[in-house]
Image (cartoon, grey):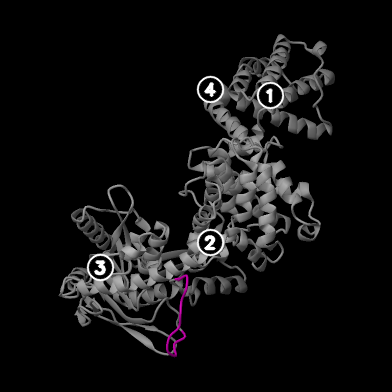
Amino acid sequence: MAQLLLELFSEEIPARMQARAAADLKRLVTEGLTATGLVFESAEAYTTPRRLALCVEGVPERQPDIREERKGPKVGAPAQAIDGFLRGAGVESLDRCEKRDTPKGAVWFAVIERQGRDTRDVLPDILTAAIRKLVWPKSMRWAANGFRWVRPLHSILAAFDGVKLVGQLDLGGGAVRFGNHTYGHRFLHPDYIAATNFEEYAAGLRSPGHVILDPAERRKIIADGLNKLVKKAKLTVRDDPALLDEVTGLVEWPVVLLGGIDAEFMDLPPEVLTTSMRSHQKYFTLLKADGSMAPRFALVANMAAKDGGKKIVAGNERVLRARLADARFFWDQDRKATLASRTTRLGDITFHAKLGTLDQKADRVQALAVEIAKHVPGADRDRARAAARLAKADLVAGMVGEFPELQGVMGRYYALADGEHEDVADAIRDHYAPQGPNDACPSAPVSVAVALADKTDTLVGFWAIDEKPTGSKDPYALRRAALGVIRLIVENGLRLKLLQVFGSGFGSFSAAVSGGAEKGAVCSDLLAFFADRLKVHLRGEGVRHDLIAAVFGLGGEDDLVRLLARVEALQDFIASDDGANLLTAYRRAANILRIEEKKDGVSYDEAPDVAGYVQDEEAALGRALDGASKAVEAAVAEEKFTGAMAALAALRGPVDAFFDAVTVNTDESALRANRLRLLSRIRATMGLLADFSQIEG
């Protein structure tokens, strides 16, 4: 067994693409090995900003020999059949075949034997194919080459069993030959580093190359360095794992340093300071003991400087000073005009070609927020109206133009500066939330009303113009918006009828916008979309999707809080012995009814004739169904779904006794019909709580 070492050395690979590229390279190469019969022991991929590396251990030095037998036509078959068999098997003539007796007569068998090749001869094609199949979110061509890759590819190190492989990657205008060397750090050691095995390669990169190959090790060095420096300064680092991952992909020899923020900028909103440092400079925000921002920042240099990093820190402080000076300008200029005065400029911004401008959207959201506020305990309608009108106004502010990620956040600051109520300001900030599963969900009543109105208007609008998500495509993030609505309702326990809200939102669109779309159809289809999103939302909580479908299957259930209470009670019921057995009985009854109704061409939904009961088990089941249906209806009316399930559980004994003692398909037609109606009552009574036909298992 031998070791395969591969390195692709290029210009800087964007940090966000590195992990995926390493995983894809590993998959493509190992799949190529496996497909050619080369079963390996292990494989590990590594990344730095300028290289993808792969080490595969335990690769056989030679492919296994292959012996394959292929059955052909009978002896004496027509020549055309024989010729087709020989071509398919890759055999020249019947002389290379064997004649074997079978129970159906003598048959030709082609015996195909292939000798395995040396792995060294097979690998170049596997590696070049894998490199070509790598898919990048963005790629480029360089020089006169037709080959596309993420950045210009400079060299390929490829070695097997301690010896350089012979091969090359054709670039369509040039070629990169396989070599046995790489390069160290761009500045600290730009010279050749020879290597023909992984141990030699990794060690040479580290010293003298000043390159730490393993991203997990670089990440730990950065995290430990941050903690050490801030502890000495009696500060803490704001938790930001995404930034830590990104910076890990930007450096090959990480050195953590601390810099200072000029005091004149510390009165800027902390979000402005943090965003400016994080987005443009990749600096870490530092906090004081009380949680407020410290006038310091941490940076990760890709250089071990002789002066301990003093010039690096000074240079970064100078760049940050210029960035924050721009932010100061925007902050001062934006506050010279009120948010309300900016709303007129929203008419110049198109929200969507078919849905009008942001000004028109603001009008719709304003009306819908007032309507929703009626159903949000504690929500002041006037404040909801004001917040909805002002929510998008900061999009035309200079600060948001510079830092789009601060939309909403800056609106809150400007609203407070204008003297708006704090509830209004908070709702402006919160109306985009939640934007993902890890985003905090607003709980302030006015914020909830405006956030719901904004997302609902977007969803109804795109449904009205029939631009819904398809497959994996969702350019307007409508799935995320629906999940946001679900979280806002569920986490705040809102008793909100979605169909009514959808209808109110639909009514805000002109006939020209909706294009003649039928209100009921749009709202029903959107509710079905919400059912699918609710399954996704609850999947992480262990709730079965079929139970959600069973409750939605009743139709008309658009109160998510009530729906989830039903689902929870149904889940507990199905998990019990009574529930599991009753579900089995339901399926038996439903199957019999489906078959017999189809055969007879009639429905047996009418009530059974009590006088037509012949056996005690029929009468007992009829009485049990009467009692259960009344109890279930009363419990559902009071939203006591656990009690309703208990009422259904009481049916288990009578139902079991009925199926044990009673023959439904008797020869007496009147008796048979009455018993089928009794089965239909089982289906109808259980259907008061859920569509049990949707439940799997």
Left or right of 456, for residue 28: left
Determine the secondary structure under disc 4: helix
Viewer-nearest of labels 2 and 1? 1
Q: Residue 577 carries which label?
A: 4
Residue linked to disc 3: 213
Viewer-nearest of labels 2 and 3? 3
Viewer-nearest of labels 1 and 4? 1
Q: Residue at x 21, y 83 (%)?
A: 191
Point out the tag, 2 or 4, that comes first from the N-terminus: 2
Query: Could you tell me residue 252's position as x and y percent?
Result: 26, 70
- Above or below — where is 418 with respect to 558? below
Q: Residue 555 carries which label?
A: none
Q: Give the range drawn in magenta.
A: 135-146
Determine the secondary structure under disc 2: strand
Residue 586 lies within the magenta run? no
Point out the tag, 2 or 3, that comes first from the N-terminus: 2
Query: Could you tell me residue 354's position as x and y percent?
Result: 72, 64
Distance in Å between CA atoms under marks 1 and 4: 26 Å
Residue linked to disc 1: 637
Mark 4: amino acid? Asp
Residue linked to disc 2: 106
- Above or below — where is 489 with respect to 130? above
Q: Is residue 176 visible?
A: yes
